[in-house]
Amino acid sequence: MAISSQPESSPSGRRSGISRRLLITAAASTLLAATAACGSAVNTTTGSSPDGLITLSMHNPDSKTQDPATWHLVQAFNAQHPDMRIKLEGQLVDQHEQRMTIAAQSGTLPEIFWVYDSLAKTMAKNGDLLNLTTILAENDLQAKFTPSMLAAFQSGNVQYGVPYQALVTGFYYNKDILRAHGLAVPRTFEDLLAAVKKLKAAGVVPIAQGANTSSFSVWAFLTMLDRFGYEEKYQDILSGRARYDNADFVRLYQHVEELAKAGAFPANMNTQTYPQAVASYTAGKAAFLDAGVWEAHKIQDSKVGRSTGFWAGPTFSDGVGEQNLVMNVPSAPFVVSAKVKEDKKKYAAVKAFLQFYYSDAGQKILVDNGQPPVTTYKPQVDAAKDPVFAAVLAEAARPGWKSPKAQPDLVVSAATASAMYDSFYGVMGGSLSPQEAAAKVQKSIK
């Protein structure tokens, strides 16, 4: 996904869970039935065409404008490998997921494609995906990744996917607003709470948030979960050996409630969307914005671009485990159809493309288009010309800080992820107590 402009989903790769999954399943069943009944009435083939030896299928209908990093990578590859030309295609996220579901069932998957990790896991279990271990072993490609970037897409000894782009999230902040009110960039939760109180008293919106049709937009708060031991706890929670509504998580929600009562969030938070929250920040109407790297270039081009910094979020004196955390994790993966192995030319093309994508030259194209590298490639970004993106990269590589292995909502079911989003916004908006918020998530765990 081009995190910067995904039209119908959250940049983390989630929508509001159950409804999306049911829609995909129902639509897929309907289309499969129609195909069986009408023969060629519905074309579910998504594989290669005369336009290319292999197809890369994405979740944006217009990659050139919606995902320029991927578009430029494909153009560069095609120029270097005219005999291995890649056809780049795409649909909106839900349509793409639906098509990949149908294609897996009908044996017509494209050679390479983006997909949510939950669906990728199912496909891997069903034998639909190529084990990429052999490809990663060639030319020492695996050494270009930190272990966490690959571990997210492993099942036993099978490497079923590779990271498409990186997910770096936190708070953007307006230096001019903070300076005008005598505030330094917060470091601890106490710092943030004090800043919120001072900004609210001065009539400034402290944190831009938008919950309407955008309940996924709580990235900085998901990172806070990791500062209360989420990564160590979640597997036991999912297996029933522990509970989400534990004392540590409830304590985090109590801190969120403190922020809410201090006036941290806009009065119209429940009626404005995430894009509207972004617009309020870029218009200079809020001190902080809960978002991620995908907004860097938009903010850079706005009136607040020259006064914006990036912050990984507060540490907690009563947190659990590692506090120096910055969310820098793989988003949803690229995967490869298992059938590619049956065609030597297509297999060679897939291998060549992955080698190019994760080469330093390929990663530079990502960086040049506003995306952080997913390998150990060290980007050279001119902080004078692109200060917002440079600030994100600097915070992601902050000395002594670590990243969780995955964003908390990406290791649970869609229903539980949705409950997480609603739990945070419930406390922010005052409709849920901290205990009720944690209990809401616990009830979603099957």
Image: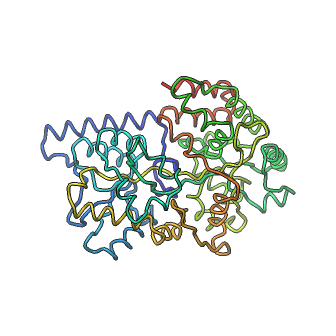
> Quadrant of the rendered structure where residue 257 is?
top right
The residue at the point 72 percent across, 55 percent down is: 285
Q: Quadrant of the N terminus?
A: bottom left
Which residue occupies the foreground of this view, 327 or 306? 327
Residue 194 point in image, percent of width and height: 84, 45
Which residue occupies the foreground of this view, 333 or 103? 333
Residue 32 point in image, percent of width and height: 22, 39
Looking at the image, what colour scheme do you see?
A: rainbow
Q: Is residue 155 left or right of residue 208?
A: left
The residue at the point 25 percent across, 53 percent down is: 46
Residue 322 point in image, percent of width and height: 69, 43
Residue 25 point in image, percent of width and height: 33, 35
Circle count: 0
The residue at the point 68 percent across, 37 percent down is: 228
Q: Is residue 124 left or right of residue 410?
A: left
Q: Is residue 358 left or right of residue 440?
A: left
Q: Is residue 411 left or right of residue 218?
A: left
The residue at the point 53 percent across, 23 percent down is: 240
* 140, above or below 336, in the image: below
> Quadrant of the rendered structure where residue 63 is?
bottom left
Which residue occupies the foreground of this view, 32 or 113? 113
